[in-house]
Structure formats: structure tokens, C-alpha cells
Amino acid sequence: MIDGSDLSQKINKKVAKIGVIGLGYVGLPLALLFAKKGFTVTGFARDEKKAALFMEGKHHLLTSEVDNDLRDLLEKKKFNVTHINSKDLKDQDVLIICVPTPIDENKKPDLRDLLGVADSLSPIDLTGKLIVNESTVAPFTTRKVFGRFKSKHFLVSSPERIDPGNDTKTTATIPKVIGGINKQSAKLARVLYGNIMKAEIIEVGSLEAAEMAKMLENTYRAVNIALIDEFAKVSEACGIDILEVIKAAKTKWSFQVHYPGLGVGGHCIPVDPYYIVSLANDLGVDMPVVTSGLSEIAGMPLFVFGKVLRLYKKGMKVLVYGLTYKKDVGDLRESPVIVFCKLLKNKGIEFSVYDPFINPSSVEKMGFVAGNLEKTDVFVVGTDHSALMQDYHKAVDDETIIIDGRNFFTTKKGKGVYGVGRTII
Ligand code: SAJ
């Protein structure tokens, strides 16, 4: 019986070979962290082309800080990148899976990437290896996809909790949840992550409890954002400033603050809840709070679009500031601002888009007109990037109507600020 003690020793001696499959927002920082701690790490990219680009330092995630780490670790041969079907895969002692788990056009889980990894692993003798699934999935998925191999391997679910754009919450400082298919697996995961984590490691009793914890934490956030969006609509109808209301409510110890806005984007919050809804449906369990919350947040771009229809007059110049899903992050995935811009376009309203994080050619590729920071009649805040504080002066004058999709402005600007749940005129 393989009890994992050999692997445990190899990990603690840092001679265990670690493979990280998927080098995005989650996999790259994780791979570099293990390598910086002295492990020999192999990153597995989707294909040879991506791997080669990575090795040349060409990857959208490679910032100057990451660049230095990467170059240094490549030189020291502590990190290298290859592709998922390379022979190096079988040489790894630990395999950590960090591939995207999006939803398809029917809002159903799209497990193609995860199943692709399983296909690459199935020909390998995984005996004695530790497989960790960090990708976000509904309960039973890790067991179904990675527990079906014949070999006696160790299996753990440890859903990622990265917060892109947040320098204070890093891979090492975010508490780590682990759940094993058996006790030995969980013990090995604790040894593994114990070598890199500053934050605590929380062990739950099964793969499924770890998977469900991730479902709960992100669904909780989506539903609470939906709640505050709904309150913003009622407050607006009452002529009450929702931010004043939130400021008061958050003095209550049990109230966790969320803010209304033009919608909810990113590859986590508007996506993950559909995984648990899909599982619940399969089990014949209804989740009306979750499903209505998801439709509420999905409807926010239309709510803000309604303000444009009321305030816009034909011929007015319209500038949308910010296209990405979240402030100071250059990520367009599921961005609600894109939905909002499509509503403008479908209505025949001419507008241009400026986002300091997105180059004009990418804006044009999306079928929108790339704009500049110059005087405009209608200024829409799609994303409240920090640069907005100085950028808006170039586009807003006394005649400009501001539609503030992120309640960025706190005092009257231009002809008036029409926010989400508040109006300053
Ligand atoms: N949003 C609101 N109101 C809020 C908070 C967010 O409308 O009060 C919108 C944002 O504008 C954005 C979307 O929701 O469009 C998501 O915002 P987010 O801050 O949740 O950003 P994410 O997607 O990067 O969330 C990550 C998540 N991390 C993981 O899933 C691993 C999430 O779990 C974290 O709670 C979140 O970071 C965090 O706490 O910052």
C-alpha cells in the first residue's frame, strides 16, 4: 500500500518535481511561488506554441515583476514551460491543475479544458503521484474526472481563490482550503502547501466539501451584489442615495458591504454559481435565490442603458470610459460593460470607448469605436479605474451628462451625475 510517506519526504526535501497545468492568473503565480521556494517546477501550457511564447517571455500576464522572477528562475533551471502532451508530464511527482472552467452559451459548465487534462493524464502511470485540482468545479467533478484512473494516486480538491489585481491578497496569503479523496491525500496536500503558504491551511473531510466551499463563497458574493443592485433601484426610485444607506448599514456588525453597479463580470462571480445551479437541477433541487440573483446582476447593463435612453439626445457625443470587468484589471472576460456597449450599438447610438488598460485595436476588434479623452456630451463610467480621477477632466465640462455605472463620483460634475442608486444634480 502506498502511504505517501516517500512523497511527503520528497516534498519536504524539495526534491519532488511539481507540474502546474495551466499558466493563467492562477497557475503562473502558483508555479513561480513553488519555484521561488526551491522546487523544480514545470509549467504545462495548452500547446507548444503557447509554451514557446511563454519561454520567450511573451504572455499577457508577464508584468515586469513577474518577468524578473521568470527570467531568474529559468536561468536557475528551477522553472521551465512545456506543453501538456510533453513526455515531462509523467516525470512529475505532483500535478496541480489550474485550467479555466467557464460556462457555455446555455450557462452550463464547460469542462473541456479539465477533460483535456484528464485525457493527457490517462495514459500515464499515476501511482504514488499527488493530483490537486485547483480549478473551480461543482461537487463530485474532481472525483469523476480525476478519480477514475486505475492507478493508486493521491487526489485533492483545493479550489483557487486568486483575486486578480489585488496585491495584498496573494497566492501565499489567502487561506487555503484542501479536501482529499482520503486522509493520506489530504495529508500530502497539507505538506505540499505548507511549503509555500503564509496563510492557514483549512482541511475539510472530502473532495466535495472543498468544491462546495468555493461554490458557496462565490455564489454568496453574486447573490449579495444582486441584493444591493436591487436596493439601488428602489433607493433611486425613492430619491434616496444608496451609498448613504450603505454607509449607515455597514455600521451593523453582521452587514457585509457590497456595492451596486453596471453589472458583474470576471471569470468567477457571474460564472461559478451556474456550476452549483446545474448540479442542483440534476439533483432535482431548486435554487430560486441564486437563479433570481444571477438574472438580477445580468440585467444591470440594461438598467444603466435605460438612463442613457432617458438622457441622450440624437447627435450627442458619447464616451464610455472603461471596458474591463473590474477596476485596474485589464481583463475583459464577462465584462458587463461589453453588454452595455452592445445595447448602445444595437440602438444605433454612436459612441466611442476609452480604457487605459485596453489598446484601441482590441476595442476596434470588438466592433466598437476606440475613443480619446476629449470633451464629450455624455460620459459613461463603465469601469472605475484609478486613472479616472485625472482622466475625466479631459472629457467632462459643465455641459457633460455623467452616467456613473460605478458610483465613482461623489460630488456633482458637469450637468449632473446619474449613478446606480444615486443621482447628484
Ligand atoms: N462587483 C460589484 N459589486 C461589489 C463587488 C464586485 O458590482 O460589491 C462587481 C465588480 O465590478 C466585477 C465583479 O463584480 O465586475 C466581480 O468583482 P470581484 O471583486 O468579485 O472580482 P473577481 O471576479 O476578481 O473576484 C475575485 C474572486 N476570487 C475568486 O473567485 C478566486 C472572488 O472570490 C473574490 O471574492 C474577489 O476576487 C474579492 O474578494 O476581491
Image (spheres, helix red, strand yellow):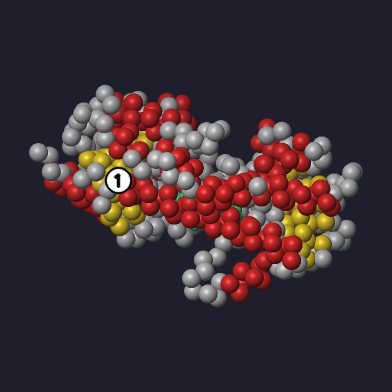
One can see residue 325 in this view: no
In-front residue for pair 217/75: 217
Q: Count the marks.
A: 1
> Mark 1 CB in 8 Å range of ligand 1?
no
Where disc 1 sits, the SS reads: helix
- How many residues crowd mark 1 within 10 Å: few (<14), some (14–19), many (20+)? many
Percent coordinates x, y for residue 386 in the rendering: 64, 58
Percent coordinates x, y for residue 398 in the rendering: 87, 61
Taking the spot 46% from the left edge, 30% from the top edge, the residue there is: 50
Which quadrant, please, contains the C terminus? Answer: bottom right
> What residue does disc 1 label?
207
Q: Is residue 131 left or right of residue 344?
A: left
In-front residue for pair 2/312: 312
One can see residue 169 in this view: yes
Percent coordinates x, y for residue 119 in the rendering: 34, 26
Quadrant of residue 79 in the image?
top left
Q: Amino acid at mark 1?
A: Leu
Q: Is residue 70 left or right of residue 1?
A: right
Taking the spot 71% from the left edge, 46% from the top edge, the residue there is: 302
Which quadrant, please, contains the N terminus? Answer: top left
Residue farthest left in this picture: 1
Q: Is residue 313 left or right of residue 155?
A: right
Quadrant of residue 363 in the image?
top right
Taking the spot 54% from the left edge, 33% from the top edge, the residue there is: 106
Taking the spot 64% from the left edge, 70% from the top edge, the residue there is: 245
Percent coordinates x, y for residue 10 in the rendering: 18, 45
Quadrant of residue 230 in the image?
bottom right
